[in-house]
Image (tube, rainbow, N blue to C red):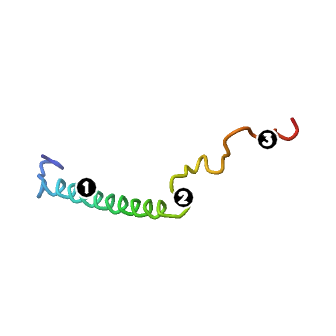
Amino acid sequence: MLLKEGTVPQHPGMSKRQKELARKEKNKEKDVRRDQRKKEKAERAGQPGQEGVDPDIAGIVPGPQPPLEGY
């Protein structure tokens, strides 16, 4: 592996080692964020009155609806 006009890198494995360390560090950060999201999700799920209720349909009353005003 030649770099500049006949020079050979001193430690060709160092760049690979640096990549491996960077990958490990990134994975650690991802694990920390993943654990934090799990904790936040568990806290949200534990709130009273929120269990088993889909937030998209909360407050919707089934059955006939009152007529719209102005039509």
Q: Which residue is mark 2?
A: 50
- The numbered mark at residue 23 is 1
Horizontally, residue 65 falls left or right of residue 59, namely right
Disc 3 from disc 1: Cα separation: 59 Å
Tell me the amino acid under the disc marked 3. Answer: Pro
Disc 3 vs disc 1: which is toward the camera? 3
Residue at left offset 86%, top offset 35% = 71
3D distance between C-alphas at marks 2 and 1: 39 Å
Residue 3 x %, y %:
17, 49
Residue 6 lies, in percent from the top left, at: 12, 48
> Which x, y percent locates residue 50?
54, 58
Element marked by disc 1: helix
Compared to residue 1, the image places residue 14 above or below, namely below
Dot 2 or dot 1: first in sequence order is 1
Report crowding for label 3: few under 14, some 14 to 19, many 20 or more residues within 10 A (C-alpha).
few
Q: Amino acid at mark 2?
A: Gln
- Looking at the rendered structure, which numbered label has been put on residue 66? 3
